[in-house]
Amino acid sequence: MNNPSQNLKNSYTLITGASSGIGKATALLFAHKKHALILTARRLDRLEQVKQECLAAGAADVLIFAVDVTQKTEIEAMASQLKTKNIKLKCLVNNAGLAKGTELLQNSETSDWDQMIDTNIKGLLYVTRALLPLLIEAKGQIVNMGSVAGRLVYEGGAVYCATKFAVRALSEGFRMDLKGTGVRVTNIEPGMVNTEFSLVRLGNQQKADVVYTDMMPLLANDIAETILWCVDRPAHVNIQELIIYPTDQATVGQVVRGDKSIKNLIK
Ligand code: NAP
């Protein structure tokens, strides 16, 4: 049975939210493995920088698109350009996403709910629907970025958790609807990863830094390596879901810091 990674060198992996964090780390790791890439996010200047880094790292090709995943017309315009270029799409990494706020429901902003639902659920759906013809043609793979928040709810996180529960449900549903097409569907569910996630959620770097103080979170590259491993399995193997926590996080809301942190235990 073929190793899909061999085929990926002659075909493309599309990553949403490639301008920072997990998406950027995945782009760079795939670039090191000589994959061809399509990178999308809203911030085009950031994408330009990531493109140059990926080319320097050895990417076979890098296309970039400024796409807001909440905007169907932008997604459809990109999909039709990819069709015109006869792109072979072997992998879609549905990574773009965010949390906004940690307030209790009664104090939270409905605009934050809209942004999380529109990005994490509807955006993922719009991108997937627009690219499915290409993915089916290539017998490709969809990697959805879920979260441990898709398994356990925490105070102040009701809506974000609901969006990641939805990503888990969608991943299961996609797998059922796509059976027999050769398309694999994987849901990656990380715990705490040190990216711009907390800065976006809390709106301030000082507050974001506190989240990762005195403990060792996952790094974006840890998740990128996990994605690459899932994609590299032979075509008859589908890693359906993977939960990855930092050693310092036993479960949602249970984090060890200071002397008990792995970074101090292994000194
Ligand atoms: P990040 O560094 O903030 O990256 C988020 C990415 O999503 C950025 O590239 C951002 O790009 C993009 N994005 C946000 N809204 C978008 C929109 N409307 N349209 C297009 N792109 C959009 O955070 P991250 O941790 O890497 O997050 C990546 C994914 O991992 C998210 O789905 C998140 O929920 C998930 N996750 C994160 C953690 C964690 O602890 N960090 C844990 C579990 C799951 P632009 O701003 O340039 O558009």
Image (spheres, rainbow, N blue to C red):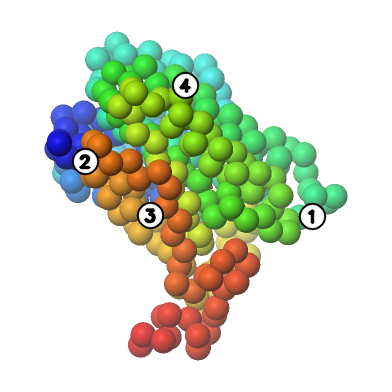
Label 2 SS: loop
Q: CA distance from mark 2 to mark 3?
A: 20 Å
Task: Residue at 45%, 56% (x, y): give it.
Answer: 243
Q: Quadrant of the N terminus?
A: top left
Q: Earlier in the sequence, mark 3 or mark 1?
A: 1
How many residues crowd mark 1 within 10 Å: few (<14), some (14–19), many (20+)?
few
Q: Earlier in the sequence, mark 2 or mark 4?
A: 4
Count the marks: how many? 4
Q: Return the mark for residue 104.
A: 1
Left/right placement of residue 60 relative to residue 68 reads left
Q: Is 106 rendered above or below residue 182? A: below
Q: CA distance from mark 2 to mark 4?
A: 25 Å
Q: CA distance from mark 4 to mark 3?
A: 25 Å
Label 3 SS: helix
Q: Earlier in the sequence, mark 2 or mark 1?
A: 1
Amino acid type at image mark 1: Leu
Q: Earlier in the sequence, mark 2 or mark 3?
A: 3
Q: Which residue is mark 4?
A: 129
Amino acid type at image mark 4: Arg
Label 1 SS: loop
Disc 1 versus disc 4: nearer the observer: 4
Label 3 CB-ligand 1 distance < 8 A: yes
Q: Which residue is mark 2?
A: 234
Task: Residue at 24%, 44% (x, y): give it.
Answer: 233
Q: CA distance from mark 2 to mark 1?
A: 45 Å
Q: Is 173 rendered above or below residue 205? A: above
Q: Which residue is mark 3?
A: 223
